[in-house]
Amino acid sequence: MTIRKTPFSVPTRRDFLRTSTAAVAASGLGGLGSFMASPAHAMAFAPGMTGGPTGFDGAERFQYNGNMSEGRAIEGIKALKAAGKAPKKLTMLLTDGAIGQITKPFPDGAPSAKEVWERETGIEIDIIGAPAEDIFKKVMQDVTTGDGTFDIYTGPWNSTGDLVSSGGAANCSDYVAKYQPDWGDPERGTPTPEMEQLLYTYAGDYYSFSLDGDFQTWFYLKGIYERPDVQEAFMKETGHELSTPDTWDEVDRISKFFTGKDFGNGPMYGNGNLMSPFWGLATFYARFASMDFPNFHFFDEDANPNLNSDLGIQCAEEHVRSFEWSPPDALTFTWAEAYATMWNLQIPHTAIYTNLVKFGDGFNADGTPKSKATGMIGSHLPVGRRHGDQINRRSVLYYHITAWVSSKSAHQEAAYLFMQWLSSTRTYTWMAGNPGGYFDPMQQANFKEPLVASTYHDYAMESIPATIARSVPSINFAGQTALDNALDEELQAAITGQKTAREAMDAAQSKWERVIRRQKRNGIVDAIKASRNTWPSIVDPA
Amino acid sequence: MKASPGAMALKYFFVLLAAAVVLYPLLWMVTMAFKPYPEWTTVSDLTWFPRNPTLQNFEFIFFGSAEGLVVSLDRTIAGPLMASLVTSVCGTLLAVVAGTLSSYAVVRFGLAQTLPLSVLQLRLFPPLAVMIPVMVMWAFIGAVDTWWGMSLIYGIVTLPFAFWLMKTFFEEVPVEIEDAARVSGCSYWRVFYRITLPIVKPGLATCALFVFILNWSDYLLALLLTQKEWVTLPVYMATLTSAMGGQMYGMKAALGVIAAIPPVVFGLMIQKHLVRGLTFGALKQ
Amino acid sequence: MTDAKTSVAPNESKRLGYWARVARDGNKMGFWFVLPTLLLLLFIVVFPLLMQVYLSVTWWTPLEGIPWYRAWEVFNWGENYWYMLTDDRFWGALWRTALIMIVAVPAQFFLGMALAYLFIDNFPGRKIFYSIMLTPMMVVPAVVGLMFFLLFQGTGPVNAHLGLPAEFSWLTDVNRAMISVIIADIWQWTPLMFLILLAGMLGVPSDQLLAARLLGGSNWQNFFKIILPRMKAVIIIAVVLRSVECFKIFDLIFIMTKGGPGVQTETISLFLYKQTFGELEWAYVATIGLTILIVLSVIAAKGLAVMAKKNG
């Protein structure tokens, strides 16, 4: 029984597992060591504050009183209790990778978010985990056949339309008016008012609670880009200076250059973007959005798909070509494996979820680096295309864990109040810094917070909000799953060479038209038109 | 008749080879259940037998945390284990009682001659082809995620096995014995209850164990008809991942071992009647 | 349900209650005996069938915002049936299901037959090996899925034994995922074939075998001329049973690959599952479900008729 040792260090899954498990173990350890935080700090609120976490330096930044969003939620619960309308327990269906963020204490000496809530309201939070890819199936199962098992659902933001159409999500507009959450606060809330509309409302009403920051953000290996020998080789081969890319053409040029090159860390691959089923759609959508100026929409004004237009096919061709520069098993990558390729210095750049750097850059509690890439990562603005003297940099909002109050819940108001408390800028900022799960920062307050900066690093504190402002929404209206699956299937067929890009786009186009025809009764056309208005208009000088 | 030594050796070679193929996956799972985290994969090295055997995987799934593990579990195995037991047992009771009674009526009184084929048809279709109405019905009567809702569906889907198995056992009971009892003045019920049932008792036990195995092995129905309180072992096992999205191989293997033990033990106990059960009585051994 | 207390001793034949009369009337008692089963059958057959027929001619999905019984508001004249006929994904899933059946069932048959032949004579240790051989089919299918999921990990023992690198993926490779699934199915269900075929072989009268051997026929000749022809019915039972179960395959694949990568291991059951909870096309699922019911029923009826004809 012998195991062949791979003679050269190509990106192996073993390496990945070694690195990533180390990161996992480390992130878990940090919290658990302090699980038995002494209650001595328990009531030490800063002056004027009435609630929030205690017991660590800077806890006052996450504390609140009755004039703040979190405080209003707590007051609301107290009023419900007084009226005898509060439940003993709220049940939440949550993506399993995010549970730690609510249940693990952070930082040292602190309680967990769950503990703070339970202490202040006496309402127990019962969390049921489900895998990220499957969670929405479970949500729909409860919507269609359940009887109020869950008070709160979570799932991908893209599914909000499906959930609202099926009547599974409670309309929270009245509660929002009553309790005034600070999601859209100009100082602390979402980077733009449009973003608040996009993340928290559907068809003009409040249904969703944003718990994530899934805006594909560009990261690159600064430590390799800036090396003189790399610079020189790039100049020699391409005739250009190696700098962070502004356009997709430049991205492809850099990808092509790095593929097969060895700069002392083993041979590299050029394209670190997600290309796999389900996750790779985000890469395609981002590339698609900048094809025209200022935006290239997925649908035209009359809700006809743009997939097999000339620009659409060109985009598909570029997308398929970029797979040449991807690691060989990129089609099997989830975000976790894709992260590992950067942590192992096998790819020069990637547009991906922001916790790439949370789990892979910096140092563990025991002082060891989280990955080989520690200290080498940088971040830049999304890329786009040059149109005259302007560039339309575009990223995409995709997946993005979102919560909804179940319309079957017997305690909608209490569930709403818990979600307002959890997603308001103070609690959420505190949680976003917690390495125990994958809720990513997205509110302005998050980016000003040292705890968040310490886990997500300073270089990301500017690029992430700038990326958010330039992000287009992926598909999020009723029929979304069918649309995404159809396109995904065809893209995969093109990438694996079973079809040409043109054939794939023609097929995807007709599948989309078919889905739209089938969904017409459910108002898909209006939803598509409404969605066009939520796209960003911001462009940058070239 | 003695085979030549060469033929015998060849025979043993093939038998041993087959046994090895059968045991290979089983052994990997069983030993995995006793391996500590570093030995779960072949990243460092491949280990067949745990170098540092540990019970921490079992400890973890039973108590929600284990020494040396940073992750913890909100829901332990206790609930799912209970759910699997309760629903399988109740489902078995339902199937065996209904199957026994109706097969007796078919065999002795010649009633409902189309019943045998009708129940058989239940097994013909992929459950997912009919699950939407079933889910709607279950939701309507409030049976989703309840012990009785699961027991009911288990009882129904395993009814064909119970029916056919008991049918073959009843067919083996000589009519003469019953007739003799009837002649001496026993009512039909008394004959059934006092004479026939005791005779088929071993068959009844076989049937119950067999049906229990089937119920215990279900995954799909529990996946569709439970949400949280009555999630059964296989469903629980499949969703067990760590808080960081990593696969908890060791814990899953430990769960797999626990889930696999009852059917394997019971299955070996009723080995003799397996053929009969699995072929709906078409074959006996 | 009848109760033991209601039975009466033979000499107390006067003033009989209803249950006592039932106990003395074979047909009446038989009716009560059959009733629970009939009720359960009706419960699980009638309503679901009606609902499926109803839904299958509408657009209805849970996204519609109206309860299912108001589905007539979105009546669509059976367009779903047309959609089904032209749906590549449905036909793809059907084809993959057929592929698994075409590969796995014959493989199980031949392996099972070979194994059964090994076990036809007694040999030291036969009992133990017999039990070992039966184990796989008793393991919960979901656990079998888990076992093979573990085996086929990049960092699992299969790659280590074959000397393949960890990035030689099985479950996420376009072709190898299907191979992995089929291997798992063969592993689990060959024992069933073995069990049934062995029972059939042992059912061949031993004096005929003995006579054949005494006449000096080779083992092969004995096998093909004496054993095989007498096992026809058993073989049909075994193959039909496995084919039916194979068509329904879900647990194994759902745990090993979830139908992936892409749709490479998506069988009809997985397709229906994803349509139900992913695309939420409930009316469409009802259409397909109903079609499957009808087609399978027709096949079953035809098959039974053919069997009856041959036997008769």
Image (cartoon, helix red, strand yellow):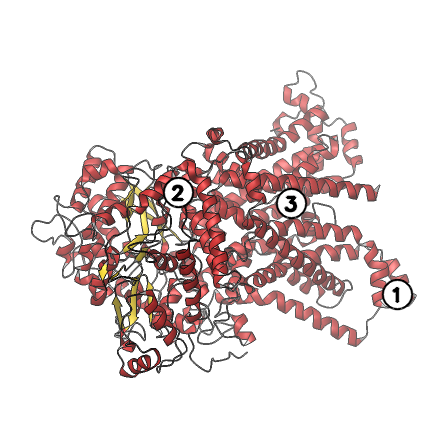
Residue sitting farthest toward the left: A47
Establish whether labels 3 and 1 are both on one chain. Answer: no
Residue C238 appears anywhere in the view: yes
For residue A150, side relative to residue A463 (left or right)? right
Q: Quadrant of the N terminus of chain A?
A: bottom right
Q: Which mark is residue A478?
A: 2
> Which quarter of the figure has residue A73?
top left
Q: Nearer the viewer, residue A464 or B51?
A: A464
| Residue type beneath disc 3 | Cys
Instruction: Kindly indicate the quadrant of the structure image that contains residue A370.
Output: bottom left
Quadrant of the drawing holding the C terminus of chain A: bottom left
Q: Are marks 3 and 1 in contact (CB under 8 Å)?
A: no
Residue C50, x across and y down, in percent = 57, 31
Above or below for A29 versus C46: below
- Nearer mark to the viewer, of 2 and 1: 2
Marks 2 and 3 sit apart, C-alpha to C-alpha, by 48 Å
Marked residue chain, label 1: C
Residue A515, given in percent of the width and then of the height, sits at: 46, 44
How packed mark 2 is, by other alpha carbons closer than 10 Å (few <14, some 14-19, many 20 or more), is many
In the picture, the disc for residue C213 is 1
Left or right: where does residue A78 sit relative to residue A150?
left
- In which chain is the residue bearing label 2? A
Kindly report the distance in space between the C-alpha atoms of the residues bearing marks 3 and 1.
39 Å
Tell me the SS state at disc 3. helix
* Circle 1 Cα neighbour tier, 10 Å, few/some/many (<14 / 14–19 / ≥20): some
